[in-house]
Amino acid sequence: MENKLRKRLQTGFISLHILHHAKEEPVFGGWLLEELHEHGYNSSPGTLYPILHGMLKEELLTVAPINVDGKIRKYYSITENGRKELKLALSYLVELVDEIRGKGNHDK
């Protein structure tokens, strides 16, 4: 059984990947799965799409269905709320990494 903490962290990291790439340009599920696999995530559509749907519900992303070669492909883009959350999450992540590496200004 996969460690529950690792699974929660992975879901969070996948969300950050999605926001990062959606900030650069609209992205679609198939491309995101390939990108995540390149980074070592063993993600499936059953993992990715619930995350995307949750992010839509939280208004971190918007979706635009586009006809590509006769098939509808959903492209996801970041919202202003998504940009704010990404920026905040990155500040927390940098602070945590600095602390773990011993670069923080913490007296312990």
Image (cartoon, helix red, strand yellow):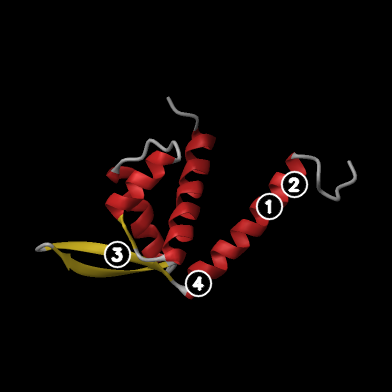
Name which of mark 2 and mark 4 comes first in the sequence: 4
Q: Which residue is mark 3?
A: 75
CA distance for labels 2 and 4: 26 Å
x 56%, y 69%: residue? 84
**Mark 2 closeness class: few <14, some 14–19, many ≥20 residues within 10 Å:** few
Name the amino acid type tagged 4: Asn
Name the mark on residue 82: none
Name the amino acid type tagged 3: Tyr
Residue 90 horizontal/vertical position (percent): 61, 57
Q: Is there a contact, CB below 8 Å, between mark 3 and mark 1?
A: no
Q: For numbered disc 1, what is the local secondary structure?
A: helix
Residue 37 horizontal/vertical position (percent): 38, 39
Q: For numbered disc 4, what is the local secondary structure?
A: helix
Q: Quadrant of residue 77?
A: bottom left
Q: For numbered disc 2, what is the local secondary structure?
A: helix
**Mark 3 closeness class: few <14, some 14–19, many ≥20 residues within 10 Å:** some
Q: Depth check: give the residue in front, 77 or 92.
A: 77
Q: Which residue is mark 1?
A: 94
Name the mark on residue 98: 2
Q: Is there a contact, CB below 8 Å, between mark 1 and mark 2?
A: yes
Nearest to the eye among marks 3 and 4: give it.
3
**Mark 1 closeness class: few <14, some 14–19, many ≥20 residues within 10 Å:** few
Q: Depth check: give the residue in front, 18 or 6.
A: 18
Q: Which residue is mark 4?
A: 81
